[in-house]
């Protein structure tokens, strides 16, 4: 969760995929909510329709959810952090260097997230 939080704070592209539309919506909403009181001002699409998959090639940061049916199409993306909600994994491409939070803030954030 902290990796995805740091990815959004540093304006990276975050893509969720799952076979469950409910899980996609919940994950996208949770990640956006973690930014409060900041406001996420980039594209936020919890469930991306198949006709709009080309949006994933956008140069701007985003939080997007896609159904797992499109798993093969999304693995070709080189600058997108991909979170597999069904498998519980996060794929961070080698070209992306994710900065972590500074130590005092990191510990406080971990403690706060463990209470949720």
Image (cartoon, rainbow, N blue to C red):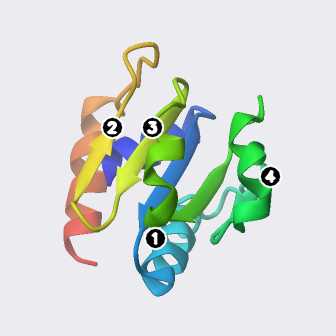
Q: Residue at x 45, y 37 (%)?
A: 75
- Check disc 3 and report the residue beneath it: 75
Q: Could you tell me which secondary element the residue under label 3 belongs to?
A: loop
How far apart marks 4 and 2 lie (CA) works out to 24 Å
Q: Secondary structure at mark 2?
A: strand
First in sequence: mark 4 or mark 2?
Answer: 4
Secondary structure of the residue carrying tag 4 is: loop
Give the label, 1 or 4, closer to the camera.
Answer: 1
Name the residue beneath numbered marker 4: 41
Which class describes the residues within 10 Å of circle 2: few (<14), some (14-19), or many (20+)? few
**Comes first in the chain, label 2 or label 3:** 3
Residue at mark 1 to residue at mark 3: CA–CA distance: 19 Å
Q: Residue at x 42, y 79 (%)?
A: 23
- In the picture of the structure, the residue carrying the numbered disc 1 is 27
User: Seen from this angle, which residue lies furthest top?
Assistant: 95
- 56 on left or right of 77: right
Position of the C terminus, as image quadrant, is: bottom left
Query: Where is 23 relative to 4, above or below?
Result: below
Q: Of discs 1 and 3, which sits in the foreground?
A: 3
Estimate the spatial distance between the alpha carbons at disc 1 and disc 4, rounded to whole Å. Answer: 17 Å
Closest to the observer, 50 or 39: 50
> Which disc number belongs to residue 91?
2
Nearer to us: label 3 or label 4? 3
């Amino acid at each position: 969760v902290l990796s995805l939080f740091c990815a959004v704070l540093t304006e990276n592209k975050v893509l969720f995929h799952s076979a469950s539309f409910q899980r996609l919506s919940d994950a996208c909403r949770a990640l956006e909510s973690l930014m409060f009181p900041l406001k996420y001002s980039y594209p936020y699409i919890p469930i991306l329709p198949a006709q709009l998959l080309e949006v994933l090639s956008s140069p701007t940061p985003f939080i997007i959810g896609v159904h797992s049916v499109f798993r093969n199409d999304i693995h070709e993306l080189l600058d997108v952090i991909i979170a597999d909600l069904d498998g519980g994994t996060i794929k961070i491409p080698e070209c992306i260097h994710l900065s972590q939070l500074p130590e005092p803030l990191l510990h406080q954030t971990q403690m706060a997230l463990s209470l949720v």
